[in-house]
Image (cartoon, rainbow, N blue to C red):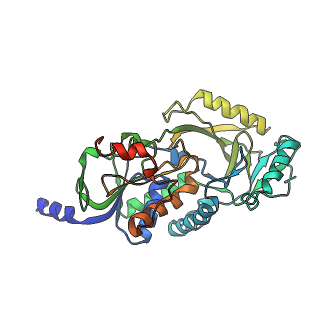
Amino acid sequence: MAIFYLYIFTKLMLDYIIVGSGLAGIAFSEFAINKEKSILVINNQSQNSSRIAAGLYNPVILKRFSEVWEASDQLDLLKEFYSSIEQKLNVKVDYRIPLLRKFYSVEEQNNWFAASDKPNLSKFLSTSLVTKKFDYIASPFNFGEVLHAGYVDTSLLLDAYNGYLKSNQLLLEETFDYNDLIINDDGVLYKNHKAKNIIFAEGFGIHSNPFFNQLPLDGTKGELLLVKASNLNLEVIVNSSIFIIPMGNDLYKVGSTYNWQDKTNVPTEEAKKELLDNLKDLIHCDFEIIEHFAGVRPTVKDRRPLVGTHPKYKNLHVLNGLGTRGVMLAPAMAKSLFDYIEKQIPLDKHIDISRIKNFVSNSYHNE
């Protein structure tokens, strides 16, 4: 009898198996579910970059005063996507609060105003100086406000969404074993689970994936602090050499560092000192460290995501490389991949893995 039920179960064809339930994985899951597709998500929590991320979304690269790639379209979808999840799961995760860039000189002010005159940046950079004085933050040259910015509480988002998947028996909490994946013309078979397509949304874990590990995903380690500052009373995001994000209850996220050599999730004293030095330069009140986070962001050298279908196996797909802007990119990239698979709408050439010529040419003999 057990064999009979196993036989029946293996004959049930899912639309998608999704490996990974960080920002990319849950974004694709949500688009699939909303289109009444059947899914199974497999995740072992080994990658934590989505969970410990600052969750900041910002349409402007403030170091260079340039627009984030496709920022307007991404922001439009972001607002719709996270609002829908909030209603669905009855949680608050999207906080649209001002983001203020602290100026350190008149020259920085002038650079800001010059940037705000550019057609592609005028809708994102306020032309009015923010002269408000905040307790414990010295600001003789005031602030500039980035419009349409905010943050997503990624930890709460992942907890709530994975809880939803689990309660609906859509989540398999285990390490994906690539040796157990059987690829057929009509789909894939993983243990007892058969699906038309499999989506790999593993973040830095892609390096263990024999089908996609030759993609140029480098990984950049980032570290953040969660601090408590009872007297700060800050209700805006402040950006200087670091950012500080109010999380409520006198708690603030402080970040972030960049390390291109260390590929571990282990917090370091070196990064902690860097963050503390910059924080003490920004705020002048007492605070205590509550937690120290570290994770490896899935970054790519050309700063574009890695999205698309395996050149040899047409049922294997990748959704990765969201880098430091996962909150903004995840909904847009997941929708692009879903529409590509379901509607044959071509992927943007800047994100399509077919742009990686070495990967395409080597894919037929390196698994």
Is 338 drawn above or below residue 143 in the view shown? below
Q: Can residue 46 be seen in this view?
A: no
Q: Is residue 137 visible?
A: yes
Residue at 52% over, 53% down: 350
In x, y percent, where is residue 197?
A: 32, 60
Is 275 drawn above or below residue 359 in the view shown? above
Work out which residue is located at the far top of the displayed protein and give it: 270
Q: Residue 82 sits in which quadrant?
A: bottom right
Is 350 drawn above or below residue 269 in the view shown? below
Is residue 295 toward the left or the right of residue 360 in the image?
Answer: right
Between 138 and 120, the one lying in front of the other is 120
Between 226 and 145, the one lying in front of the other is 145
- Rendered-image quadrant of the N terminus: bottom left
In x, y percent, where is residue 207?
A: 40, 40
Q: Residue 223 sits in which quadrant?
A: top right
In x, y percent, where is residue 72?
A: 64, 62
In x, y percent, where is residue 81?
A: 55, 65
Is residue 260 toward the left or the right of residue 40 in the image?
Answer: right
- Rendered-image quadrant of the C terminus: top left
